[in-house]
Image: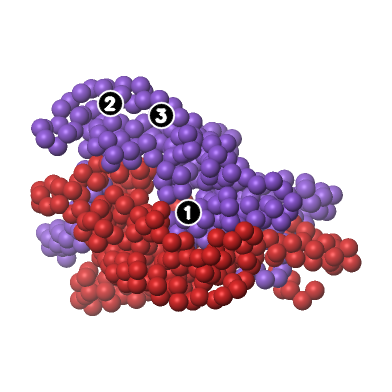
Chain colours: A purple, B red
Amino acid sequence: MSVSARRRRRLAENVTAYGLLSAALVVFALFSWYPIVRGVVLSFQQVNFVSDPEWVGFDNFELLFADPLFGVAWRNTLLFTGLALVFGFAIPFVTAVLLNELRHARAYFRLVVYLPVMLPPVVTALLWKWFYDPGPGLFNEGLRAAGLPDLAWLDSSDTAMLSLVLVSTWANMGSTTLIYLAALQTIPGDLYEAAELDGAGIWRRLWHVTVPQTRFVLLVLLLLQVVATMQVFTEPFVMTGGGPDDSTVTVLLLLYRYAFVYNDFGSASALSLLLFVALGVFSAAYVRLTKRSAE
Amino acid sequence: MKGAPGPRTLVSPSQLRSTRGRIVYWVVFSLVLLAFTLAFLFPLYWAVTGAMKSPDELARIPPTLVPEQWQPETFAQAWNELDLGKYFLNTIVVAGGAWLLQLAVAVPAAFALSKLRPVLGGAVLGLMLATLMLPASALLVPTYLTVSDVPLLGVNLLSTPAAIWLPAAASAFNIYLLKRFFDQIPDELIEAATIDGAGPVRILLRIVLPISRPVLAVVSIFAVVAAWKDFIWPLLVLQDPGTQTLSVLLQRVAPDLRLDLLVAGLVLASLPMVGLFLVFQKQILAGLTAGSLKG
């Protein structure tokens, strides 16, 4: 093949390739790349849909900082994330380790633990709202059956956030558990045998073999869970609307109010920018720390 | 013990075989079985039977474990009163369209990037993957504004299914999963077909797609499930009640609806996803571990 023929073929291949890529390039440009840029610009603009957007510098941020709900929303979100980690990170790991030892009914365990993951989150939230009902609700009935006092669940600012975390843990633990379980099944059996020969009991084997061998998966899921739970919206929106006493107003719920209740798209964008920066700083710091501890 | 011996895990086989080991095993097994059934199946039983109780029985304290009077006609009543047929259709149109468009956009793009390797292909892929780093909530407001007035085209997509289809099609994750699979297809296969005179599109349709069934199944199932479960985006862009999806409808009518009708509606809205899970369990559980750890 001559040089020019090869070049022509290469050009034709490029044309075909970009032809096949064109649909993706259009949707990414319009619905992903452009909104990213626009989101940043919007944060510094006032948008009222009557006149053109006006550049207002840091006014949107100042407005947010002055809103008493701003601090409340961040505190609530961090509380949710913290509690969700305690439950949603620890319980699935313990469950997975336990399931990995069981030799019977494995298919059943995998099936039922993942079933809630398939339910639409709104369905889960509304079902649980009914379970939490202080009167004929399932949970208080359970407490009474066990001889324990009733709880106010969603109706008290002390327990509302915890109640939301429980729903979210129930709904999502299936995927976490099964990912851990898959990781546990890749651990070579001779590591346990060797540790046992060295005289390590169950707890030491767990700590010195199981945990280090699944470390990568544990760390990745920790990061993903923090990023996901910091964006919690459906549970508070459907179950409490942010109440009682603003105890379940999260950052995303506040963002929703700014954008779609107050129609202040500039401040809402400023709030998403802050959330993005917070998550970005967390992810970067986290990746660095885990890299360093891996060396 | 009858269970499969399986690979060596935390607990040593000799410990398991001892009398004490067997007793401990069966006690732990029974406890886990009971806990899993209570935690994950019982709430679903409670919902299905709750829908079939009469409104009086549903409000009774203490609640009944088994309905005294079975009223399965509540499901039909909920279907009619909520006009569920229409909302099921809306949801199917939204989820089905999102699925088809995601495949139509991602498959050719991933094929071009993987096998045709055009100039700047690496940069394009990088720009797409970079969007995965952004938390979804950071783009809610700018994407909403974009959908309400699409640049260059100047159309308003609000309250049309396209408002969900198009942003869903800009999925870097699909392109990533597909490209990783296509990368494993040997280049020799493509070259042989080229020598036989097949063009890239023919190669994609005749050779690549048939051997990519497993990954196409994973991408398809996840696209459909994600669209069916999504709440916040449909809530924002489907403001016209007649165009809403099941999740948005249920959330909207929940505060004023008779409890037995609401619970029946929740059960009905979950059935398609539960059915899908029972049919495609293997693919879903395999895709879960393949998809969640992108590294």
Q: Is residue A180 among the parts visible in the rendering?
A: no
Q: Is disc 2 on the same chain as disc 3?
A: yes
Chain assignment, label 2: A
In space, the residues marked 2 and 1 are separated at their CA atoms by: 33 Å
Q: Which residue is mark 3?
A: A69
Vertical arrangement, residue A136 with respect to residue B149, above or below: below
Would you say the residues marked 3 and 1 are in contact, meaning their CB atoms lie under 8 Å apart? no
Residue B98, horizontal then vertical, whole percent: 29, 63
Residue A184: mark in rendering: none
Is the residue marked by circle 3 packed among few (<14), some (14-19), or many (20+) residues within 10 Å?
some
Q: Residue at x 59, y 72 (%)?
A: B67
Seen from the viewer's position, the closer of residues B266 and A259 is: B266
Q: Which residue is mark 2?
A: A60
Which picture quadrant has residue A4? bottom left
Q: Residue at x 62, y 45 (%)?
A: A151
Label located before the other in sequence (2 or 1)? 2
Residue A293, horizontal then vertical, whole percent: 59, 35
Residue A125: mark in rendering: 1
Vertical arrangement, residue A229 with respect to residue B179, above or below: above
Chain assignment, label 1: A
Seen from the viewer's position, the closer of residues A187 and B121 is: A187
